[in-house]
Amino acid sequence: MAGNSSLRKANKAKQDEFYTQLADIENELKHYKQHFNGKVVFCNCDDPYESNFFKYFAMNFNYLGLKKLIATCYDSSPVAYTQLSIFGEEREKTYTNNFRRAYKIEISSVQDYNNDGSFDLTDVRLLLQNNKNTLSLLKGDGDFRSVECVELLKQADVVVTNPPFSLFREYVAQLVEYGKKFLIIGNQNAITYKEIFPLLKNNVMWLGHHSGGQTFQVPFDFEQNNTYIYNGVKYAKFGNICWFTNLDTDKRHEEMQFYKKYTPEEYPKYDNYEAIEVSRVTDIPCDYDGLMGVPITFLDKYNPEQFEILGLDRYTVPKEFLVGGRVAINGKPRYARIIIRRKTNAD
């Protein structure tokens, strides 16, 4: 079993422990309320002192009808000490010589202070005064792949978190292996990973409601052009973020509407594959039933009842015909293209 040293090494090298903003979590999670009633939710990459995922589920514990909320963190963090404590002196139990120790928090009961199924962040400190809720140190380092964290995973019904981007493949593989429902954040480029794309193609997972720009809290040594500091906290804006899930929603079954007609001039065929190029998802021709190459942003609106995904160019076209690893037109490779076909029973 991989240890925490590799996780810390990945975070140090790639600086990818980014803390999701509460507003972004609320904006996405509002579409999944029906999936949480009576369920155990596990946030296994989340320090409750800093994670807005934990705060969201703690605040909405009764509103969502949760059975239990579990959160674990690993034993160091580039973002530690940047948020106010939400548990007061209890926080100090998890630190030794300014080094954060791995721990877990299990929430089984939240008193409804506002009489509407929710409570304010100012009330979160009261959680540990309830003897049904516990904070305890982990024996190991808190790596999501560790034995004790896997045992917690087995108890969970739904996993919701922002895993380290550098470990996204391994993280998703674990969720699939244990048959868990999940809603997680990842980089849009993960769509093209050879370990991830087959899951999207075969409807094992799909994209959530929101994709695109998102702001994260980042370590102070994270360097990127679009970073800024506000109230002593460093943030970065990313434009290629996706929610990945296997929780069904109405959006996934909305029929895509198209109006453009097919012409050979506007939709040329690839040099190296028998499919037409469609440069924008909105330009998919409404009257063409053959193979089409579309941008990966197609997955943001993909309806599996309307279209069939045949593959991704680099995994579908024989290697000897690829140009720079891609499909091409007039010898020039296109960016990554998903090969699709309209289903015959679709109107």
Image: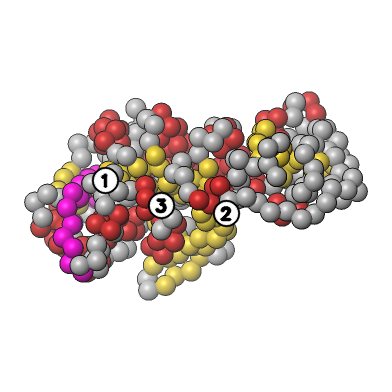
Quarter occupied by the N terminus: top left
The image quadrant where one finds the C terminus is top right
Residue at 41% x, 64% y is 23
**Is 103 contained in the magenta span?**
yes
323 displayed left or right of 244: right
* Mark 2 vs mark 3, CA separation in Å: 22 Å
Q: Position of residue 217 (x, y in %)?
A: 42, 61
User: In the image, 36: left or right of 101?
Assistant: right
Helix, strand or loop at disc 1? loop
Residue 239: horizontal and vertical position, in percent? Answer: 57, 58
Element class at badge 2: strand
* Front position among marks 2 and 3: 3
Q: In the image, is residue 156 part of the stretch drawn in magenta? A: no
Residue 138, relative to residue 217: is it above or below? above
Nearer to me, 269 or 225 = 269
In space, the residues marked 1 and 2 are separated at their CA atoms by 33 Å
Disc 2 target residue: 240
**Residue that label 1 marks:** 38
Q: Are marks 2 and 3 in contact (CB under 8 Å)?
A: no
Q: Which comes before the other along the chain, label 1 or label 2?
A: 1
| Secondary structure type for disc 3 | loop
Residue numbers of the magenta segment: 99-114
Within 10 Å of disc 3 (Cα), the crowding (few <14, some 14-19, many 20+) is some
Quarter where residue 62 is shown: bottom left
Residue holding disc 3: 32
Amino acid type of disc 1? Gly
Residue 229 location, x and y as percent?
Answer: 44, 70
Q: Earlier in the sequence, mark 2 or mark 3?
A: 3
Task: Report the residue at 48% width, 69% height from top.
Answer: 228
Report the residue at 83% width, 51% height from top. Answer: 261
Identified at 36% across, 43% down, the residue is 159
